[in-house]
Amino acid sequence: MSATHEDIEATIVRLLEPYNKDGVPLAGDTRISADLNIDSADVLNFVMEVEDEFDIDISVNELADIHTVADLANLVAERLEASA
Amino acid sequence: MADLLDKYRDLKERHDAVTQRFADPVGLVNDRILSPTRGIINGREVILAGTNNYLGVTFEPACIEAGKEALEEYGTGTTGSRIANGTYGLHTLLEREFARFMGRAHCIVFSTGFQANLSMIAGLCGPEDTIFIDIDSHASIYDGVKLSQARFKTFRHNDPDHLARQLARHDPGKGGRLVILEGIYSMLGDFAPLRDFVALKQEYEFQILLDEAHSFGVLGERGRGLAERAGVEDGVDFIVGTFSKSLGGIGGYAVSDHPMFEVLRYAARPYMFTASPSPVSIATTLCALDIIENEPQRRERLMKNAERLQRGLMEKGFQLGLTNYVSPVVAVICPSEEAAVAMWDALLKNGVYVNLALPPGTPNKLSLLRCSASAAHTEEEIDQVIAAFDRAREQVASLAG
């Protein structure tokens, strides 16, 4: 049941792909809003998709500390662990 | 060090690109207003079909007279906030009248609808609380949420199942939970499935704030709004609305039966530290409220006009935001931002004003020509609007071709 950090990152990258209009190579160190030119409405949609995919709770305020794909994967892993 | 306005260079370029070719969509001046449905714009008489003047009360002789009397009796402005010198007998009278009309114990009047949302959301919620908002919520709701410093989450537009999932996996901790909904969503005109949202209270604990900005005076047998129409007023804890649409003035209100509601008068900062509405605004709103209560035929005319507009545009092959029921907001979906701006400009030249709504402030990044019907439109005016859409489309197509 426990997903590895790599699994989580891979899932996040998959969810992020539709918002990657400029075709930036996506990896753990990709900065989600700075590198992808993703507007605030899309950020909200993306977060809902992450919540639904992993069935976890993320408040929008928490995104202030999330910059990269890896940051988000850490938060997801933390939430999955807490709900396990 | 960067210049503070440098961050808006892209925004300015986008605006300049539009105004080089077309009328300025965000700087349009109504040179004269002739009636609730007619104005002079850029030297041309136009039919106003995007004003939210749903019941057409802005030139009502009784309301104008009431405004004049208040001006003579109370002066031009209150020069103070509600908690200082800015509360007049008129303000408290309107609050009592509004509470009575809405069948609620309490009403607070605000200076604008935007401030009603800021005051209510930031007054009700703090950092320990969590707010759940529809992804397509109005800017005043997003800003109220920010001001409150509460945790917040979004749910998919008009999707009670998704809200249920969000509530189920959320731990409120020590805080409360507020779900914010709108009666009519202003861009596409769709109604919230309010019964289904309220039904979630059987399974989850939360309170509801409903913004009836576009639905007050418009929906429900008595005109109280969507909560009345859906038969779930008891399940809605707080209702917010505005005086600037069906009531034809400016200001906002919030009503509730909560026994502690009045505490917000000395807890909600956007209420406490802004000047109170002018006596004229309160007096004309009191008069317009009387019209909403006593002239239900205006709601019937509004919906007839809305239906005529919706049907006419559909018959002409326009893609509408809403087709399965009638709403006073009729939004035409354009294939692109450029097409929307060109159509909007051509409509003006054909004597019709509608709202141009472009991303990012629109649902799903749609480019919209947003019309709002009014009870004051004649059938001929509605038909002229439809014909203007048809002509404008031909003119834009021939330009592009």
Image: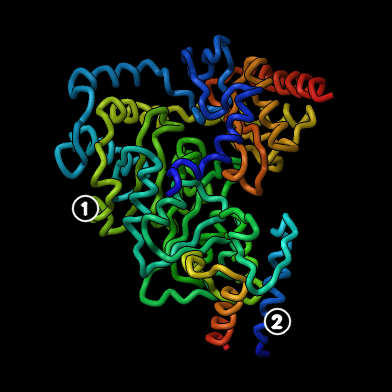
Q: Is residue B317 left or right of residue B63?
A: right
Q: Is residue B400 visible?
A: yes
Q: Chain of mark 2?
A: A
Please name the residue shown 22% across and 32% down the image.
B90
Q: Residue furthest left?
A: B85
In screen coordinates, is B342 left or right of B187? right
Is residue B297 in view from this perspective? Answer: no
On residue B266, the disc is: 1
Residue at the spot 45% in from the left edge and 32% down from the top edge: B245
User: In the rendered structure, which amino acid carries the disc numbered 2?
Assistant: Asp
Q: Residue at x 43, y 51 (%)?
A: B143
Q: Residues within 10 Å of mark 2 (few under 14, many from 20)?
A: few
Residue type at mark 1? Tyr
Q: Residue B15 occupies which quadrant of the picture?
A: top right
Query: Which dot, 2 or 1, sits closer to the camera?
Result: 2
Q: Residue at x 29, y 38 (%)?
A: B97
Viewer-proximal residue among B5 and B141: B5
State the SS at label 2: helix
The foreground one among A54 and B20 is B20
Residue that label 2 marks:
A7
In the image: residue A63, left or right of residue B80? right
Residue B212 coordinates in the image, percent (x, y): 46, 44
Label 1 element class? helix
Where's residue B45, x and y in %?
57, 11
Circle 1 crowding by C-alpha within 10 Å: few under 14, some 14–19, many from 20: few
- Residue B97, above or below B259: above
Residue B284 position within the rendered picture, expressed as x and y whole percent measured from the top left: 33, 25
Is residue A4 depicted above or below B129 in this figure?
A: below
Q: Give the mark count.
A: 2
Instruction: Out of A78 and B178, give the one closest to the viewer.
Output: A78
Q: Are marks 2 and 1 on the same chain?
A: no
Q: Position of residue B22 (x, y in %)?
A: 64, 22
